[in-house]
Image (cartoon, helix red, strand yellow):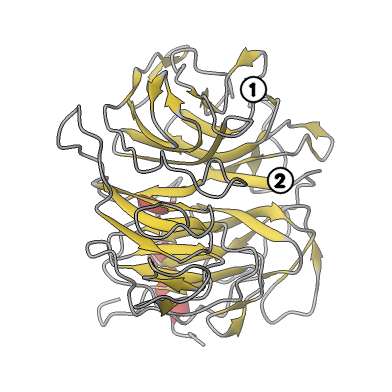
Amino acid sequence: MFARATYALVAALTLVPPGIAAAGTTEHDGVVSADPVDTTPHVLDGIVNAIALVDGTVVVGGSFGEVREAGSARTLRRANLFAYELATGRILPGFAPRLDRPVQALAAGVRGTVYAGGRFTRTGGARTRGLALLRLSDGSPLPRFGAQVRGGTVTSLARHGRHLYAGGDFTHVGDVARTALARLDAVTGEVDPSFTIEPGAPRGGRTRVHAISLGHGRLAVGGDFTTLGGLPRAQLGLVGVAPPASTARGLAPSPAAVAPWRTDAYRGRCMADFPGYVRGLDLAPDGSYLAVVTTGGPGGRGRMCDTAARFETAPPSETRAVRPTWVNHTGGDSLYAVAATGAAVYVGGHQRWLNNPDGHDSAGPGAVARPGIGAIHPRTGRALAWNPTRDRGIGIKAFLAHPGGLLVGSDTTRLGHEYHARVGMFPLPITPDS
């Protein structure tokens, strides 16, 4: 129980920057509490895939149909998307859009709006193929935003100003060919013709972007590809992006180029079922490093299957491949989500252990139990003592760090030894001057 956290959350709301959308946009001075707040609502079925924070409103997307406020017996119908007040946990009654298929990605918009991406084709009576911009006041799509994604799913979103980046396994946005990665006008949804960088040459049957992270003029991209913009980039790459410049008619062309940064860490193979195994990534708040998590099956020392890793983003030279600063092995369990806050690198999946390079679906020498969620020291790469635990299930699919703490989305109902169905939040400890 963490009743004192409500005061800290209310205070923190004054510090939340408009449009905060990515885990790495917020720096923490310390590690969050292992005791979740009591106010988060419950998602009663399915799985949570994505979380966004729009000012003081939390938006939750996934594959589900029913939600309930904490302490309430009243079940509310919500079709794959709902929103609640961060400080109180009150579910927004007017935000109940009916999306016909799951939501895979979210990003904060401006002036009370949120972007949703996924497999859906309609929102209520409106055609919103794979991508929509919705009003939080009533859940309706903004008609001016006309992006229609074809040939696949949107799995990740990130916005900066009037640039909206979308990743997935799609082939077109509208009539414009874009393979797995696109930059759109965040207001109109039109494809930016000046951004033509595409991933390619997948190790599996289809090019996919599983995760993106945006900050400090760089876009980190991870997924099933071996080239990025035609350059060799095994499952992971950085793109230099300029801030958007507005003109009277919209956006001026903004240069973008694949950065010389590269790593060979993910060239190796894991289990045959996982030809591409990078699943989550997050740029640190200061942009100095990138945290990456993977699936893939037991790999052991020297392999990057089922691991978390840190990479410095400034390479020692343009001709040398960057090696990981550290690698932390689970010993055979997948990690899907990661959040780097400066004080910790939080990792989530269905793992049983961390610090386990010699484990093979077992606890090797030095392994520590961290069921379903854990935190790693950003400098040493060793698991921190923080160990709230959770029911493992499929795993955590969403983290969102914000000035008040860390939001978590998954498919299970026990978090920090308490009932928190599929959504929970670990607050930052209250300090004397909070």
Image height of 176 relative to 368, above or below: above
The amino acid pointed to by label 2 is Gly
Residue at left offset 62%, top offset 32%:
169
Residue at left offset 51%, top offset 63%:
332
Image height of 356 relative to 318, above or below: below
Residue 267, label in figure = none
Residue 93, x across and y down, in percent: 73, 60
Q: Quadrant of the C terminus?
A: bottom left
- Sequence-first disc among 1 and 2: 2
Residue 340 lies in quadrant: bottom left
Of 285 and 389, the residue lying toward us? 389
How many labels, in total?
2
Disc 1: which residue: 171
Residue 108, x across and y down, in percent: 52, 44
Residue 31, x across and y down, in percent: 33, 72
The amino acid pointed to by label 1 is Thr
CB contact under 8 Å: marks 1 and 2 = no
Q: Which element carries disc 1, helix, strand or loop?
A: loop
Left or right: 245, with 205 as reference point:
left
Residue 204, x across and y down, in percent: 60, 34
Q: Residues within 10 Å of mark 1 (few under 14, many from 20)?
A: many
- CA gap, disc 1 and disc 2: 27 Å
Disc 2: which residue: 139
Q: Which element carries disc 2, helix, strand or loop?
A: loop
